[in-house]
Amino acid sequence: MIGLSLDPNIKTPRAYAAKNQLGWIIGFLGDWSKADLPSKYGVEGFPSIFLIGPDGKIIAKDLRGESIKTTVERTLAKAESAKAH
């Protein structure tokens, strides 16, 4: 899991990660108005949650609430099943 920040300065996401004891990598993309990556992925607001497979392809997007957990569980179960065969 990674988080990507679109803040005007790097201090904001660093402080947020420290305060909330986030256990994953936070990447800093810079100011929203100057970053081109969000538009490449159709990001129009926050949070934007994507499940990306090991091959780099998007498995699911626009996940919210309980669907995050169920989508990850379903995807992992499918991968385990494929490995067993």
Image (spheres, grey):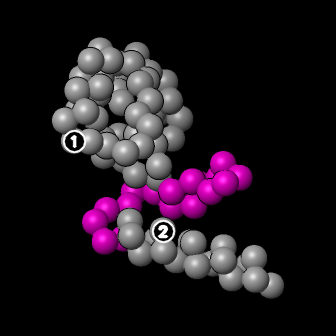
User: Residue 83, position in %: x, y?
Assistant: 75, 76
Q: Residues within 10 Å of mark 2 (few under 14, many from 20)?
A: some
- At 21% across and 41% down in the image, what residue appears? 20
Residue 6: mark: none
Residue at image point 25% right, 33% down: 18
Q: Is residue 1 visible?
A: yes
Amino acid marked by disc 2:
Val
In this rendering, is residue 83 above or below 32? below
Specify whether 40 is left or right of 3: right
| Quarter the C terminus occupies | bottom right
Q: Find numbered disc 1 in the image and state the secondary structure of the residue it sits on.
A: loop
Q: How many marks?
A: 2
Q: Residue 48, position in %: x, y? A: 37, 47
In the image, residue 36 above or below residue 60: above
Residue 6: x percent and y percent? Answer: 34, 27
**Is residue 60 in the magenta section?**
yes
Q: Position of residue 9 (x, y in %)?
A: 29, 15
Element type where label 2 sits in the image = helix
How far apart are the alpha carbons under marks 2 and 1?
22 Å
First reached walking from the N terminus: tag 2 or tag 1: 1
Q: Is residue 13 above or below residue 22?
A: above
Query: For the magenta stretch, what is the residue range?
Result: 51-67
Q: Which mark is residue 20?
A: 1
Viewer-side residue, 20 vs 50: 20
Residue 72 disc label: 2
Toward the left, the furthest residue is 19
Q: Amino acid at mark 1?
A: Asn
CB under 8 Å between callouts 2 and 1? no
